[in-house]
């Protein structure tokens, strides 16, 4: 509890300070009661989920956290900033008046009420945004299409299509109809390959029990292939034994097999057309920092040459930055996920893209190119932590490979 004491104190201080705006605008005791009771209830629920260890990965806990954000973020970033900003100005004006005289009208109650009303009005924007993200945003699936050109793509694969999804996090779902709609949307792309780049569950293989049939309905000409993400290993759960943890992972692997997916564990596959081939590589999770580093690129590329056209599935995009993009094996295209685009940001297609996650990951959403090699970072199919999405919508990526014509 000690490590949570400071955040709790900060929460209460922000809550009390933001209340000044409410008190200035209204004197209704019912509103006062609702303000404090709702704040204390949400704080209590969040503390409970932290104490019981269900934070982030239980759907119920996620909604507690979402409610917490809806109440706290407007107070912290709008009410406190606006009200505290005015108090700073009032302080300096007061000091100036005390020293040399000034306009006492700055302290009129009507001014304070006006500022408080503006603050409360502006605070409604993030509140509404967070609420929308929880109700609609998390299932607002988008199909994003990219055409990528390569000089060394075999001619027989000119126009070959890949549909990528990532970060399903099935333990978070609460609407079977919406999930089924998205799976149908994947199949409607009629791609040559469907590729899943990790994090099928939050923690437990059993989270897929209710979803095996729907995700087992994926269909692609050359099959469905997958890799593991950091959440698939069960590293964020306290197990009774290593054997129990290993059994959970084995169950998850078997689940993918039952769904007709081919899970690549540091290995590769070959696809042939008209005597020409491309290679699909799948590595286990490899992430910079404290994330699991089970991925073995050398092993996964066994028997492959520099001249082969290669597509790599690697869950964490930091792998591309750290090991892949300059690897002498010349991996032309990497597909990753992991970041979720933080499930929050601003995107204006073709012009502007921003999310706080960009300060943690250099490659966090969409297509990037360096040294003539590409990575696509999928924004994720599901959600985790905050049970919603704002501005960064769940993504189904369709990539068409094209033979680049080199002019003589």
Image (cartoon, rainbow, N blue to C red):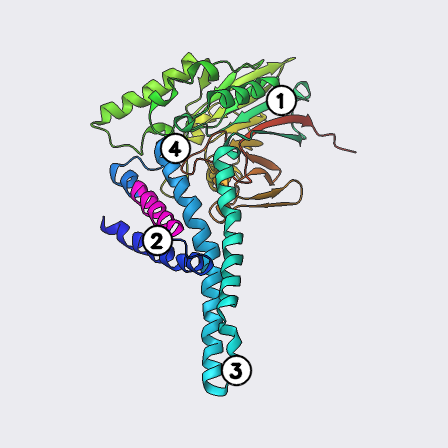
Q: CA distance from mark 3 to mark 2?
A: 36 Å
Marks 2,4: beta carbons within 8 A: no
Is 138 or 401 nearer to us in this picture?
138
* Residue 349 shows in the view: yes
Say if residue 268 shows up in the picture. Answer: no
Was residue 314 drawn as part of the magenta stretch in this picture? no
x then y, percent, for residue 363: 53, 42
How far separated are the C-alphas under marks 4 and 3?
61 Å
Secondary structure beneath dot 4 equals: helix
N-terminal of the two: label 4 or label 3?
A: 3
**Mark 4 to mark 1 CA distance (whole Å):** 27 Å
Seen as rendered, the residue at the extreme bottom is 100
Disc 2 or 1, which lies upstream in sequence? 2
Q: What SS does tag 2 mark?
A: helix
Residue 36 magenta: yes
The residues tagged by marks 2 and 4 sit, at their Cα atoms, a distance apart of 31 Å
Is label 2 or label 1 in front?
Answer: 2
Q: Which mark is in front, 2 or 4?
A: 2
Q: Earlier in the sequence, mark 3 or mark 1?
A: 3
The image shows residue 91 at horizontal and vertical percentages of: 45, 74
Instruction: Mark 3 vs mark 2: give the one in front.
Output: 3
Q: Which image quadrant for residue 65?
A: top left
C-alpha separation, residue under disc 2 versus residue under disc 1? 49 Å
Which segment is the magenta one? Answer: 30-46
From the image, tell me which residue sits under label 3. 102
Secondary structure type for disc 3: loop
Most foreground residue, 359 or 372: 359
Residue in the image at 61% along x and 18% along y: 188
Name the residue carrying label 2: 11
Residue linked to disc 4: 230
């Amino acid at each position: 509890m000690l490590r949570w004491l400071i955040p709790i104190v900060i929460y209460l201080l922000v809550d009390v300070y933001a209340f000044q705006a409410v008190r200035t605008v209204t004197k209704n005791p019912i509103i006062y009661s609702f303000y404090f009771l709702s704040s204390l209830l949400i704080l209590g629920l969040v503390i409970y989920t932290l104490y019981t260890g269900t934070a982030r990965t239980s759907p119920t806990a996620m909604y507690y956290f979402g409610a917490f954000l809806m109440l706290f973020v407007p107070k912290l970033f709008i009410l406190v900033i606006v009200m505290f900003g005015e108090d700073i100005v009032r302080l300096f004006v007061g000091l100036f008046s005390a020293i040399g005289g000034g306009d006492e009208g700055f302290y009129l109650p009507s001014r304070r009420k006006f500022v408080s009303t503006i603050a409360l009005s502006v605070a409604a924007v993030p509140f509404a945004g967070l609420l929308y993200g929880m109700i609609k945003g998390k299932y607002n699936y988008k199909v994003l299409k990219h055409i990528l050109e390569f000089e060394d793509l075999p001619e027989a694969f000119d126009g070959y299509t890949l549909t990528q999804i990532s970060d399903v996090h099935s333990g978070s779902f609460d609407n079977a109809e919406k999930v089924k709609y998205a799976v149908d949307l994947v199949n409607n792309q009629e791609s040559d390959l469907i590729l899943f780049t990790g994090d099928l569950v939050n923690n437990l293989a059993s989270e897929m029990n209710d979803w095996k049939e729907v995700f087992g309905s994926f269909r692609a000409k050359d099959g469905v292939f997958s890799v593991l993400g950091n959440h698939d290993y069960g590293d964020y759960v306290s197990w009774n034994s290593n054997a129990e943890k290993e059994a959970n992972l084995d169950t998850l692997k078997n689940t993918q097999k039952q769904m007709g997916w081919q899970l690549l564990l540091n290995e590769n596959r070959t696809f042939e057309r008209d005597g020409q081939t491309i290679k699909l590589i799948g590595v286990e999770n490899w992430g910079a920092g404290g994330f699991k580093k089970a991925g073995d690129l050398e092993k996964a590329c066994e028997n492959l040459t520099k001249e082969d056209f290669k597509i790599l599935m690697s869950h964490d995009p930091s792998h591309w930055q750290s090991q892949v993009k300059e690897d002498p094996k010349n991996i032309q295209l990497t597909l990753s996920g992991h970041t979720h685009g933080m499930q929050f940001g601003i995107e204006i297609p073709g012009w502007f893209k921003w999310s706080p996650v960009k300060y943690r990951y250099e490659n966090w959403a969409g297509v990037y190119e360096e040294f003539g090699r590409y990575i696509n970072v999928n924004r994720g199919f599901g959600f985790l932590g905050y049970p919603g999405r704002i501005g960064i919508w769940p993504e189904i990526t369709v990539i068409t490979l094209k033979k680049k014509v080199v002019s003589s």
